[in-house]
Image (tube, rainbow, N blue to C red):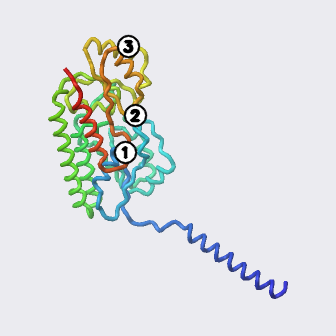
């Protein structure tokens, strides 16, 4: 090797080494910060935390699941979900058995603090021995969940407690106003009979004191058997039930058949199982439900 080749080779080697060092630096994961990481299980719970943590310092607030997964029945945690859990400090769940994967979460992160939003709920409904966990469609329950989560956040993260408390007060005030509008504008629906084809809407119907017949559908109206349909039609005709509630994302087929056989009206409502990650979505969608219900003509 002559001198010129040696120099060229050395320069090339240096360039390669520098490039390699640069690439390693670039791909090195960013230093972990010391922010408090809050993970909510799914959409309606994440909307609550979005409202509570606004303005809080040194926290990260994420949702475990995507905003379009719907209800968590039979949900299987993904690798990405598990990674969120491993880094989390606080996990907020709806509770009442909705998050069937809690054992897996507790196994993955034994230091995780758990907030169960349902611990102070007293009006749980039961169907075939199963507790209906979709409590949030009753505004009073939702307020209770907001307050429970706020209290626990204050306890686990006292640095931000004044912010959580102030946000909670502001949010609860808006929710109370919405609830008063429900009570005032929907008095005409008290004791009205309704067939509810989505378990997530039963608490809403109960909160306005309707006489609810709930059909278990696991959010999929298409699962109803011919026998079940026949029984519902008989009941509706016998008891003169003229209203059917279904969730916005439900399949219309069975509701349509019931309506055709009985002359009942189908009312599509939002059960807040999914939607935009926007902190006002609960208020907005429940206000839309109110508008739909207040326009109903009933006997
Ligand atoms: Zn569900």
Q: Which residue is mark 1?
A: 43
| SS category of the residue bearing label 3 | helix
Between 163 and 221, the residue placed more toward the observer is 221
Ligand 1 closer than 8 Å to the CB at disc 3? no
Quadrant hosting residue 259: top left
Residue sitting at x 56%, y 66%: 27
Query: Relative to 71, does residue 296 appear above or below in the rendering?
Result: above
| Percent of width and height locating residue 165 | 21, 56
160 relative to 81 in the view: left or right: left
Residue sitting at x 42%, y 36%: 73
| Percent of width and height locating residue 296 | 24, 27
Residue sitting at x 60%, y 70%: 23
Upstream in the sequence, badge 2 or badge 1? 1
Query: Relative to 85, does residue 132 appear above or below in the rendering?
Result: above
| SS category of the residue bearing label 2 | loop
| Percent of width and height locating residue 100 | 41, 39
Number of the label disc, if any, that sits on residue 249: 2
Q: Which residue is mark 3?
A: 230
Q: Quadrant of ligand 1?
A: top left
Between marks 2 and 3, how big is the CA–CA gap? Answer: 24 Å
Upstream in the sequence, badge 2 or badge 3? 3
Residue sitting at x 43%, y 46%: 66
Query: Dot 1: within a 10 Å radius of its alpha carbon, few (fewer than 14), some, or many (20 or more) residues?
Result: many
Q: Nearer the viewer, mark 2 or mark 1?
A: 2
Between marks 2 and 1, how big is the CA–CA gap? Answer: 15 Å
Query: Relative to 11, does residue 95 appear above or below in the rendering?
Result: above
């Amino acid at each position: 090797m002559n001198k010129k080749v040696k120099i060229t080779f050395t320069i090339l080697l240096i360039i390669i080494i520098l490039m390699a060092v640069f690439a390693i630096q670039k791909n090195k994961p960013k230093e972990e910060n010391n922010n408090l990481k809050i993970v909510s299980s799914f959409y309606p719970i994440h909307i609550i935390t979005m409202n509570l943590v606004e303005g809080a310092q040194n926290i990260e607030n994420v949702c475990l699941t995507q905003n379009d997964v719907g209800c968590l029945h039979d949900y299987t945690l993904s690798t990405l979900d598990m990674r969120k859990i491993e880094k989390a400090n606080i996990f907020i769940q709806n509770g009442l058995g909705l998050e069937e994967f809690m054992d897996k979460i507790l196994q993955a992160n034994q230091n995780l603090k758990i907030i169960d939003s349902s611990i102070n709920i007293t009006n749980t409904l039961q169907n075939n021995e199963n507790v209906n966990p979709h409590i949030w469609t009753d505004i009073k329950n939702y307020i209770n969940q907001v307050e429970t989560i706020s209290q626990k956040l204050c306890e686990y993260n006292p640095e931000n407690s004044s912010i959580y408390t102030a946000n909670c007060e502001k949010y609860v005030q808006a929710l109370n106003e919405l609830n008063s509008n429900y009570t005032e504008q929907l008095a005409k629906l008290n004791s009205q009979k309704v067939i509810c084809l989505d378990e997530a809407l039963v608490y809403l119907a109960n909160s306005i004191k309707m006489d609810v017949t709930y059909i278990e559908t696991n959010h999929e109206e298409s699962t109803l058997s011919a026998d079940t349909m026949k029984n519902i039609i008989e009941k509706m005709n016998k008891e003169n039930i003229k209203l059917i509630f279904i969730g916005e994302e439900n399949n219309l087929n069975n509701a349509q058949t019931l309506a055709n056989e009985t002359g009942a009206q189908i009312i599509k409502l939002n059960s807040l199982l999914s939607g935009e990650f926007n902190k006002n979505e609960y208020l907005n969608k429940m206000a839309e439900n109110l508008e739909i219900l207040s326009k109903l003509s009933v006997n």
